[in-house]
Image (spheres, rainbow, N blue to C red):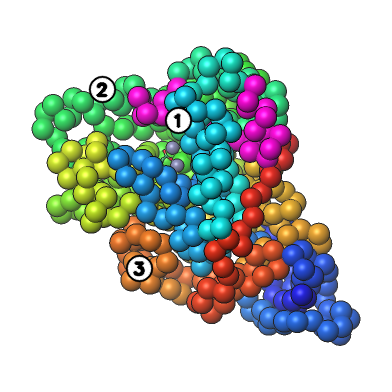
Amino acid sequence: MKTLIKNGHVVTAVDTYVADVLIDGSTVAMIGIGLEGVVGTVDTTIDATGKLVIPGGIDPHTHLDLPFGGTSSSDDFETGTRAAAFGGTTTIIDFAVQYHGQSLNQALDVWFAKAEGKAAIDYGFHLICTDLPDARLPELKGLIDQGVSSFKLFMAYPGVFLVDDATIFKAMTAAGNAGGLICMHAENGVVIDVLVKRALAEGRTAPKYHALTRPTLAEAEGVHRAIAIAEMADSPVYIVHLSSYDALKEVQAARDLGLPAYAETCPQYLFLDYSYYEQEGFEGAKYVMTPPLRDKSNQEQLWKGLRMNDLQVISTDHCPFCFKEQKELGREDFSKIPNGGPGVEHRMSLVFDGGVVQKRINLNRFVELTSTAAAKIFGLFPRKGTIAVGSDADIVIFDPDREQTISSKTHHMRVDYSAYEGRRVRGVTETVISRGNVIVENGTFKGKAGMGRFLKRGTFA
Ligand code: URP
Ligand code: ZN
Ligand code: ZN
């Protein structure tokens, strides 16, 4: 099966040029000018004149079918990956969870079963580790050898996910030695727990207290500690869902010292802010996620961090819960609202609009932040994250001029609200190709559940 994408603006993290791209089977076979007359018969020709031809998006932070907060995230691997595809994301890295008493492989097997036969795009796994006695540390290397080369540890959620500093240090040492990467949920969860209990004891139960009990300093302290422990363990560290300037300053300081500290932020921290919690009634529950939305003044600092490469990746932390049935669990007590929000579908358009259209980042940086950097950090490059001869033909044809209005009425995520309801954005995913197969075309899904393949990732380079 051969597909020729004609005359598009090919954009990678480093190049921008007009060219034709020939896909043969599942990979890119040729890039050049005037290929139509040269390559002979093809099965499909796509005219991309005036469109951007970019690497498929990589979202390295999703939670599909995640049991959490007394319920499960509302998108499973079928609905979540289909929604991702509609938005131009062709690879996700989801978080499998090891619960107490489970071996790391037992945990992973549960997530393999969740994804198999359902995922419409390629997927990898990080593993959330919650139970790491010394005897289990060698299992980290076993997982890295199987292509699960990153692990998430939590400094938050005592009694659920939190692991202590000794465990963090040992895990970083073991993972670092084997070429693995620790992803850190960096918030001082122990202090936050006290603040939460205090607020509830004072009768402060509304959604906004979720934010007011999770100060930016708790995040900054977690980031500082994570990086310091990583330095002592001589290992890299990747801070997930960084939300605030206070936390960013810690990453900046570390990187200025030359430490291998990396971080991602998410669209919600770039476009939404604390005022969303102040809405009437229980509306604020829609935005209960961790870390919480911050004061608006943080946003330009995060954009600056993205520009200056103190932040390398924009992921979504997609972890949707329906407003009517699931967020409702915390109507009387904000600490019982399932933490997380939807976002996997609109990352590319939001970042293009807020970043490129608003002139905060250029096109190459847009591609780097939404695809290439994640591929490099998480051991997928150059198979994913670029358009090059031999790379997987994961390609998005993106219309930089068309506009869309984001709404739960039109989105494909299985959740009954949009965090961006009514927001108009410029930049629309038009055609999505996954390993050579057109999976989205003119707003129609052409892929199939189960088409996605597990990605055995390499070590941290
Ligand atoms: O609120 C969030 N972020 N839910 C998902 C779990 C996590 O901490 O990433
Ligand atoms: Zn987290
Ligand atoms: Zn998350």
Q: Considering only vertical position in the picture, is 448 above or below 190? A: below
Left/right of residue 208 with respect to residue 104 in the rendered view:
left
Q: Amino acid at mark 1?
A: Tyr
On residue 194, the disc is: 2
Q: Which of the two residues, 46 or 112, is positioned nearer the viewer here?
A: 112
Q: First in sequence: mark 1 or mark 2?
A: 1
Q: Helix, strand, or loop for circle 2?
A: helix
Of circles 1 and 3, which is in front?
Answer: 1
Q: Are marks 3 and 2 in contact (CB under 8 Å)?
A: no
Of circles 1 and 2, which is in front?
Answer: 1
On residue 407, the disc is: 3
Dot 3: within a 10 Å radius of its alpha carbon, few (fewer than 14), some, or many (20 or more) residues?
some
Q: Name which residue lies at 70% across and 68% down.
A: 436
Q: Are marks 1 and 3 in contact (CB under 8 Å)?
A: no
Q: Helix, strand, or loop for circle 1?
A: loop
Q: Amino acid at mark 3?
A: Ser
Dot 2: within a 10 Å radius of its alpha carbon, few (fewer than 14), some, or many (20 or more) residues?
few
Give residue 371's quadrant in the image: bottom right
Which quadrant does the C terminus fall into? top right
- Residue where numbered disc 1 is placed: 99
**Quadrant observed for ligand 3 in the rendered image:** top left
Q: First in sequence: mark 3 or mark 2?
A: 2
Residue 230: horizontal and vertical position, in percent? 58, 22
Q: Name which residue lies at 63% across and 38% down.
A: 148
Measure the C-alpha gap from mark 1 to mark 3. 35 Å
